[in-house]
């Protein structure tokens, strides 16, 4: 079965760079039609999509954060890494990674449990 | 970006009620509309993808309909475990976008 798990620091200081790792199993990110997404949710607020990396290494970003975001994949390790630079307290959120595939309309069909990131000095 | 507007933002209902949540897109998204259920402290779960396809393992009391810009999620008979927040999301274009959520509470 497909599982995903996020890992990263729970606390970062303003201006620092956040690096989050999504480690997955049950699928390969070299399979045609597959993608891994990052989504976040500030406390008490709605879900916000951040980035997507496809099986062919095509990458898409949230336009308002494009200058600060980077997404990469390591197919040999079954991992996807998200970096977000110049962290600010408004970036405090639960960060999720999620699987998507073309045969399910690229919906987010499997999610990690989420990792809470707080930005504070 | 494609904006998604859900209505209502919240509703109170009783067990057994039929509940309808709507999602309107700022432009046509054909049928690339998905619905999620989220309970407090948990990751969202996919309920419906591609407007009307029920995700494996989800109860058949959940159904979706619509096309173009107007979509609906229906719960045919609300159960105690259905009290949660529901989000619509479009996968027609990037950036992917979500609605603001509809909180379903116990009346």
Image (cartoon, rainbow, N blue to C red):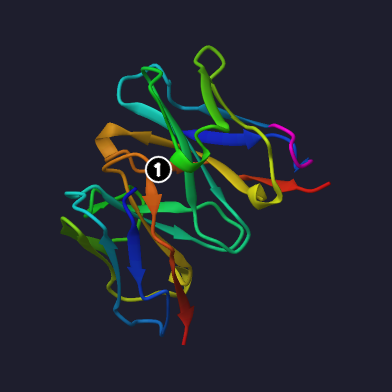
Does B10 sit above or below residue B35? below
| Magenta stretch bounds | A13-17
Task: Reply yes or no: does residue A25 show up in magenta.
Answer: no
Q: Position of residue B65 (x, y in %)?
A: 19, 61
Residue linked to disc 1: A108
Q: Position of residue B15 (x, y in %)?
A: 40, 82
Q: Which residue is pictured at 39% across the width and 60% down the height?
A: B99
Tally the numbered discs: 1
Compared across the picture, whether B30 is left or right of B99 comes to left
Does B68 sit above or below residue B6? above
Q: Quadrant of residue B60?
A: bottom left
Q: Can residue B90 be seen from the camera position used here?
A: yes
Q: Residue furthest bottom?
A: B107
From the image, give the main secondary structure of the stretch colored magenta. loop
Secondary element type, mark 1:
loop
Q: Can residue A1 be seen from the camera position used here?
A: no
Does A30 sit above or below residue B15? above
Q: Which residue is pictured at 26% across the width and 58% down the height?
A: B25
Compared across the picture, whether A99 is left or right of A33 comes to right
Q: Position of residue B52 (x, y in %)?
A: 21, 55
Q: Residue furthest right?
A: A121
Compared across the picture, whether A5 is left or right of A1 comes to right
Marked residue chain, label 1: A
Asked whether A80 or B26 is in front, the reply is B26
Q: Which residue is pictured at 48% across the width and 68% down the height?
A: B84
Q: Position of residue A18 (x, y in %)?
A: 68, 34
């Amino acid at each position: 079965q497909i599982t995903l798990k996020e890992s990263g620091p729970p606390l970062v200081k303003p201006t620092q760079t956040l690096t989050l790792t999504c480690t997955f199993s049950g699928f390969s990110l070299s399979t045609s039609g597959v993608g891994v997404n990052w989504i976040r949710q500030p406390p008490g607020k709605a879900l916000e999509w951040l980035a997507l990396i496809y099986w062919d290494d095509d990458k898409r970003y949230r336009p308002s954060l494009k200058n600060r975001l980077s997404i990469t994949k390591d197919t040999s390790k079954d991992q996807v890494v998200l970096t977000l630079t110049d962290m600010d307290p408004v970036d405090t959120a639960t960060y999720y990674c999620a699987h998507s595939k073309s045969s399910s309309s690229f919906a987010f069909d499997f999610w990690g449990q989420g990792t809470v990131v707080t930005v504070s000095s | 970006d494609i904006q998604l507007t859900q209505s209502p933002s919240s509703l109170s209902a009783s067990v057994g009620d039929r509940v309808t949540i709507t999602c309107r897109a700022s432009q046509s998204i054909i049928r690339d509309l998905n619905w999620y259920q989220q309970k407090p402290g948990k990751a969202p779960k996919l309920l419906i993808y591609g407007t009307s396809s029920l995700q494996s393992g989800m109860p058949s009391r959940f159904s979706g309909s619509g096309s173009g810009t107007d979509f609906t999620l229906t719960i045919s008979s609300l159960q105690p475990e259905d009290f949660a927040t529901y989000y619509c999301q479009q996968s027609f274009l990037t950036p992917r976008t979500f609605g603001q959520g509809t909180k379903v509470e116990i009346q």
